[in-house]
Image (tube, rainbow, N blue to C red):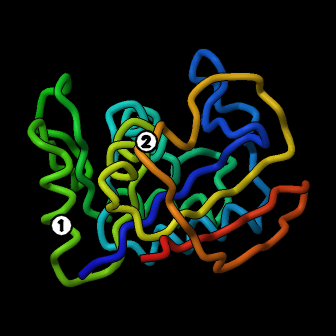
Amino acid sequence: MRKLIYGMNLSLDGYIAAPGDDIGWSGPPSDELFQWWLDQEQASGLTLYGRKLWETMSAYWPTGDQQPDATPAEIAFAQNWRSTPKVVFSSTLDGPLDWNTRLVTGDALAEITRLKAEDGAPLQIGGATLAAAAMRAGLIDEYAIATHPVLVGGGTPFFGPLDGWVNLNLLETRTFPGGTVLTRYETRR
């Protein structure tokens, strides 16, 4: 069975995007934090995206390695992003999608459950709406939270509403330059 990991950057007050889907407060990350995210992406066997995060990622990373100021880590991230299999869950996008990506327009939770049941490398899930549905269904095995020292006052929360408590075990705490604190938790089953 594959592990499902939900990880994103968030503000100290719990948002992955400020009002207007603004994520400018989260970057540019320190080289060390960016390398940590790259390592996570390289360890993943499949990335699951909601529509909005897919649109954000696919607007930059297909050519991120061709930018004149791209760092070696950014080049590696772009190359890995293109080659890693991806599934986008959306009822509004039309397929086919590029960059090793498959579109699912049906029951997201049934497909995530099916993918988790396979053998293989961990799955990464991104996008607040998609992850919230997976959280409520009890499908998330691990949370990786990179908390930035900024308050944005509103926007898109990292955690959606839950039907009950989810107990967690702390796996790791790490501080990066600039004051970003990474915490990783596993779901206590």
Image: 66 above or below 77: above
Residue at screen point 34% across, 59% down: 138
The extreme top residue here reads 20
- Residue 132's spot in the image, x, y percent? 41, 43
In the picture, the disc for residue 115 is 1
Image: 26 above or below 188: above
- Which element type, helix, strand or loop, lies under badge 2? loop
- Residue 141's spot in the image, x, y percent? 42, 70
Q: Where is the N terminus found, in terms of image quarters?
A: bottom left
In the picture, the disc for residue 132 is none
Counting other residues with Cα less than 10 Å from the Cα at mark 1, is it few (<14), some (14-19), or many (20 or more)? some
Is 18 left, or right, of 55 in this rendering?
Answer: right
Identify the residue position indicated by label 2 in the image: 127
- 150 or 98: nearer the viewer: 150
- Residue 134's spot in the image, x, y percent? 33, 51
Residue at screen point 12% across, 36% down: 105
- Residue 178's spot in the image, x, y percent? 90, 54
Q: Amino acid at mark 2?
A: Gly
